[in-house]
Amino acid sequence: MNTSAAHGPHDAGDVQETYDDVVIVGAGPVGLFLAIELRTAGVRPVVLERLAEPDVGIKAAAIGAVAAEALERRGLGPALDKAEVPLPAAKAARARPGRVRKPGGHFAALFVIDQDLQREPDRHSRMVPQDALERILTARAAELGIEIRRGVTVRELAQDDAGVTVGTSAGPLRASYVVGCDGGRSTVRKLAGFAFPGTDPTLTGYQAAVEFDAPEKLTPGWQRTPRGLITAIPGRVFTAEFDGPPADRDAPLTQDEVEAAIQRVSGTDVRIVSMEKATRWTDHARQASTYRDGRVLLAGDAAHVHSPFGGQGLNLGLVDAANLGWKLAAAVAGREDLLDSYTAERHPVGARVLENTRAQIALVRPDPLTDALRTIVSDLIRLPEGNRHIGEMLSGVGIRYDLADADPLVGTLVADRLLTLADGTVEYLYTLMEEGGGLLVSPSPRPLPPGVHLAHVKEGPALLVRPDGCVAWTDASETSLDEALACRL
């Protein structure tokens, strides 16, 4: 699969298709990061985006822990440091220079999550807004020579044994694989015929960047009221009303509509002086039955949608991209068997997020039965084990893929750590992974296959880390290192 032009199956001799290794549809964070992962692995992707300019709507305010780690493993830590929005000094702690520690989170607006209770408390979210992340990823894509074609709409999709033909508004393309990273209403998912089962929406919510005439009328923090849920911080407001989905989610959103919802939920006459941007949201939760159909794959919101509770969507999608990138690169090079593990590993993680977001919606409903349930759940979360369980679930650090190995470390996503190398120098593990490929950390050097690098350390246990940060083997594994290199990497 090279970059030379080729004629595809169309009869018209004047139509020339470009042939790329992978066509990625969607230039949001997931599509951009997947492209970076592929290019780092030596694959040439092209990214198609229907929008002529980046979307400027309401987006995520932070990057979850395991997604931030995936970015750091590709050398993007310094750029994230510069884009980080600092927490108030009283709440900030430094795990490493430039890393701002997020002291907690919430589960269904219960602010009792204490990351100090995690088994690895230094693994935490990055307070980097999504729009800043998109600029960082776009810049890295440009450095790598990745082509992003904006204003291009996908209209047709047809795959065969040799590749995929993509019909677009700019003409046909031919590629080995196509990945839909084009959001919850994914055109790729629909054209390819992926099943997308789940639950229908039950509420109408709004997120908006606003200024109020009298912000003191709104009680700070998350407030459950007889009409729903509201939280307001300077410049931003979030509401939910449990009276069914929007009549028309695609209708233009007006300031009057948002203001009326805020007044209903809060029970005040607060007025919006100005509204910079706003969006409707709801709680439909759906997941593709599989993330792969032959040569067409899905990642991010194209594969799963859910409510924004817990702020897990960006975290989930970026780690989809990390898991898929190196496997898809291997498939382009001729080793397609690794792609089978993409759905097997990531589908259960997505299902877990859908499950906990549904649970959070159930825990914020405005009724006495929910009041009683919240009291019990709050008590459970205050217990160290309950707190750890919820915290690691929301952050993603509790992920463990099933690699058929009893060693509890195998299948987990490795935390960064300082390694003392055999020559006496010290280096962070993630720094050694910036160029992609697998990494064997071992005090005993040995020949390794192409694409696997050695970190020869002075002492300590040995472990094999996949390009996506997953521990594939340790010296306590049931399988041999040779077996792990052959089957897991």
Image (cartoon, rainbow, N blue to C red):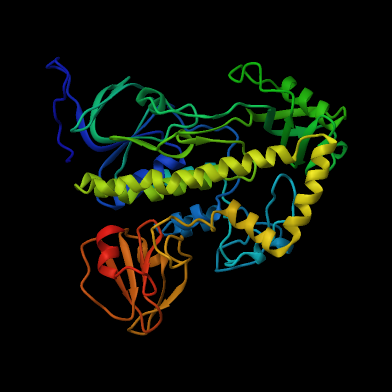
Residue 174: image location, x then y, percent: 22, 29
Tell which of 426 and 483 is nearer to you. Answer: 483
Residue 383: image location, x then y, percent: 74, 62
Tell which of 376 and 229 is nearer to you. Answer: 376
Q: How many dots with numbers?
A: 0
Q: Residue at x 85, y 41 (%)?
A: 219
Residue 240 seen: yes
Residue 133 seen: no
Residue 322: image location, x then y, percent: 40, 50
Q: Residue at x 73, y 21 (%)?
A: 257
Tell which of 89 and 308 is nearer to you. Answer: 308
Which quadrant is home to the N terminus? top left
Q: As displayed, is residue 84 above or below residue 284?
A: below
Q: Residue at x 29, y 69 (%)?
A: 481
Which quadrant is home to the C terminus? bottom left
For residue 255, side relative to residue 45 (left or right): right
Return the residue found at the far left. 13
For residue 487, side relative to residue 86 (left or right): left
Q: Residue at x 40, y 42 (%)?
A: 32
For residue 148, side relative to residue 208 (left or right): left
Residue 344: image location, x then y, percent: 40, 46
Quarter location, residue 395: bottom right
Quarter location, residue 116: bottom right
For residue 126, side relative to residue 165 (left or right): right
Q: As displayed, is residue 111 above or below residue 138?
A: below
